[in-house]
Structures are given as C-alpha cells and as structure tokens.
Image (cartoon, rainbow, N blue to C red):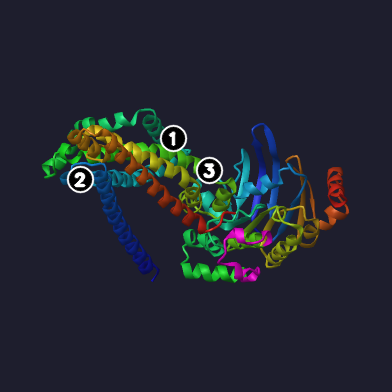
Amino acid sequence: MEPAIRMERVNKWFGSLHVLRDINLEVAPGEVLVIIGPSGSGKSTLIRTINRLEPIQSGRIVVDGVELSEDQRSIEAIRREVGMVFQQFNLFPHMTILENVTLAPMKVRGLTKEEAERKAMELLERVGIADQAGKYPAQLSGGQQQRAAIVRALAMDPKIMLFDEPTSALDPEMIGEVLDVMRELARSGMTMLVVTHEMGFARDVADRVIFMDEGRIVEEGTPEEIFSAPREERTRNFLHRILHH
Amino acid sequence: MRYLRLALVAVLGAATLVLLWFAFFYLLAEGVRLYLGAMQFTPSKVTFYADSIRRGAEVTLKLTVISSLAGLVLGLVAGISKLSRNPIFRQPATFYVWLVRGTPLLVQILFAYNALPQLLDPLWKPFERMGASPIQDVLTEYWAAFIALSFNVGAYNAEVIRAGILAIPKGQWEAAQSLGLSQAQVMRYVVVPQALRIVIPPLVNNVVALLKDSSLAYTIGLFELVMAGQRIISATFRPVPVYLAVAGVYLLLTTVLTFFTNWLERRFQAQGARA
C-alpha cells in the first residue's frame, strides 16, 4: 500500500544548525505515530516539514502520493489534506469559534455557509463544545480552545493530522479532555503524527513510537518496545528523566 | 436577507452621517457668527464672514475625509507590497514611501498643481479629443490637493500598516496556511483584520496630521479654512480674532475626528476580545 507519508534522506539546517539529519520515515495510512525526544531534538521541525511550514534543504517528502516542491499551488494542495494542531492553539482571535471552523471549508473547499456550519456544529458536538460555537476564543478555557482548534483542522476532512505538542500549553486538569478527543480520532482510523511528552497517551494510542535526538531518529518501535525495553542508551536516559522527574 | 439588512444599515448610516454633517456645519457657522458679533465686526458683514469660515471648514474636512480614504487604500497596498518577497511588488512600494516621506508636502502639493498637468497633458490628449475637458481644468486646486494629500498620507499609512502586519504572531500565519488558504486569503481573512485593529490609533494620528496639513493647499489657491481666514483679514485688518477663530475651528475639527475614531476603535475592539 502507498504510504501516507514518505520521507527520504531529509536534511534541514537553521543557519549552521543541522536540525534534521538524513531522516527516512514512512507512515502508513491509518497509523498513529508518536514522536518523542528532548527539546531541540528536531521533532517539531520534522512534522512541520510535512505541510511545508518549514522548507527542507535536501531530500524528498511525498505526502499522499504528491511530492512536496517549491510550487505554491502544490503546497496549498497538500495543506488541504493535512490538518495541523499547534501547541499555542493559534485560533483566530477576531472570529467566533464557528467562524474559525467554517473559514477554510468555505474559502478553500467552496462549501456554502450552511453546509460548512452544519458540519462544524457536528464536529463541535463530537468534541463537546457545540455550546461554545458563538463565543470568541479568548472566552474559552485552554482545553476548549485546543478542542476547537482540532475541529478547525478536521473540518477540512484531512487525510493526515499533525499534532505539535497539543497539550504542552494546557493546565494539567485540561490535558485529559484534549487527549480524549485525540484518542477518539485515532480509533476512527485517522493517520496521525503526534509530537508529545504525554507518555501515557503514547503507550495507549500509538502504533509506533519514534525517539529523536539531535536531529536524528535514534530508535523506533512499538510502544511496548520503546517504553519497556529501549535498545539505545539515549532513549533510556530520556525516558528515565521524563518518567522519574 | 442578510444583504438586505446590511444595505439598510448602510443607507441609514450614510443618512445619519449626512445629517450630522449639515447639523455640525450649521452650528459651526452660528457659533462663528456669534463670536464675530461679540468681537464687534461690522454687523452687516458678520453673517457673510461666518459663512465663509463655514465653507472653508467644509472644504478642509471634505478634503481630509476623501484623502484619508484614498490614503488608506494606498497605504494598505503599499504596506502589504513592502512586505512581499517578490521585488516586483516590494521595490516600487519601498521607492514610493522613500520618495514621499523624504520630500516636503508643500513641494508635493505645488508639484501636483503646477507640474502634474504638464506631465499628464500628452497622456490626456486622446481623452480631450473624445470630448473631455483639458487636463488643467480637471486638476483643479481641489483635486490637485487631493492627489498630493492622499499620496502623502498613503506613504505614512504604509509604514503603519507594515508594522501592524508584522505585529501579528507567526502562529496566526501558520494556522491559516496549514488550512490550505492561499497567501492572499491568509492576508485578507486572518492578518489584515487583526492588523487593522492594532493600527487604528496610529492611523488616526495620521488623519489628524492630514487635517492640519491640508492647510498647505492654501498655497495653490484652494479656498479652504486658512484661505477663508486670510480673506477676512484682508478685508478687516483684524488678524487676532480671525486667526483665533481659524485655529479654534481646526481644534474643533481635530477633536471631533478624534472622538469619532475613538468610537470606531471601541466598536472594533468590542467585536472579538483579543486572545
């Protein structure tokens, strides 16, 4: 089967800093891939190259059968199929939640307002914040905002969802509600790439876990393999630090 | 239904503005009349003088309003172009801002009135043959002043708008882009609406400056507020009360403008608290 994402020898530099080193990665449709690693290891950068928020200097990235290039139109075409959820939510503060969710389906997919709103309300219902539809982002709690941000991405019917530390900016009591939504999404068969420090989530939901350090994929395996019997010293150290702090 | 309501609001709003406009200038003329009377100007002339001040003030305010609207459009285009990665957009915009901000407005106004018709004449000839008036008659004092003032304020607005756009967090761009919106859509639906809110106070500043700067159009013989005052002084040799009146009217106009735009700013901020 054609992989949902294929990365071949991908390299990226920020100036003289080599942030992605020869990354080779394939993600199957429907797979849930969790990426862990210390900060600065390149894990956020990695998923941000997939929808071209970060350009790469060498290598190939093929998303859903289409190779990423410099061409703005092809970039936009891929972004339509790849949803992204950010650490800081990045909801549009001047729009209501409903407007946030319906903007892209109307302007990019060409849905009518009625269609877009009906769909938005269904999705908001699914994540339990339909009653917040008319409010502005600033009026919602962090957990509600992040759920709205997930809905905003889902409203485009993406084939792939990227999560860049979606719970890192949340108060502890709100993390659960966001992870629940992501769990449900994983069960529904969505292809997901998740950068996170939530090891419990990774253990429960991931089909595969990748450990990154210094721009390299150091180790990969099932959650069982990575968490119970890591092969690499660096993985062991990292897991030790994060699980026993 | 929605468009009908919008149209209704627009019509009612416009009607209210027109009404306010006439009421304001009626009251202004009455006020000036009382003031000149109290200052013991010849009673038979007081109404005429007051009316001239009113006419001058109306020209000043009209010129300011249309020049700021044109300047807003120019500023948006130039400000966004200055941020473009494409030099075809960026360089002309940078040149425009550099040119306008580096030369005196007085020179720009004189240029628009005296030099521009000569420069445009060859281009205008075909239109003239089709029955249009000669370019000198089209570029009256009023329209020459309009051109100079809108280009001038447009350049200052461009810098303000550029700064406002740069103030929008990177995450907003990324979120919009990641949804598949085109660059133009990101600008139109996400960045510009938020940037406008930030730039309203400095834009108002520019408009207030423009209102005062419009007095420079006096030099090309436009009958605006300063010219109205000068005429009265020539006839009466009483500069003190007349200049005081002229200055007072400017103060009143800038104050009204500030109130109006403060109100606008609050309206903007009321819809959608910032995150």
Kindly identify the residue that appears in the image at 51 percent across and 58 percent down.
Answer: B270
Q: Position of residue A177 (x, y in %)?
A: 72, 64
Mark 3, secondary structure of its residue: loop
Q: CA distance from mark 2 to mark 1?
A: 58 Å
Q: What chain letter is assigned to the residue under label 2?
A: B
Mark 1, secondary structure of its residue: helix
Same-chain check, marks 1 and 3: no
Of circles 1 and 3, the one toward us is: 1
Magenta stretch bounds = A125-143
Same-chain check, marks 2 and 1: yes
Q: Locate residue A12 relative to residue B99 in the image: left or right.
A: right
Callout 3, which amino acid? Glu
Q: What chain letter is assigned to the residue under label 1?
A: B
Q: Position of residue A176 (x, y in %)?
A: 75, 63
Picture quadrant where residue A225 is located: bottom right
The one of A41 and B90 positioned closer to us in this rendering: B90
Q: What chain letter is assigned to the residue under label 3?
A: A
Disc 1: which residue: B87
Mark 2 crowdedness (10 Å alpha carbons): few <14, some 14-19, many ≥20:
some
Mark 1 crowdedness (10 Å alpha carbons): few <14, some 14-19, many ≥20:
few
Identify the mark at residue B46; answer none if there is no mark: 2
Disc 3: which residue: A70
Q: Position of residue A155 (x, y in %)?
A: 57, 64
Same-chain check, marks 2 and 3: no
Callout 1, which amino acid? Pro
Residue B261, can we see it?
yes
Kindly identify the residue that appears in the image at 47 percent across and 67 percent down.
Answer: A113
Q: Position of residue B11 (x, y in %)?
A: 32, 63
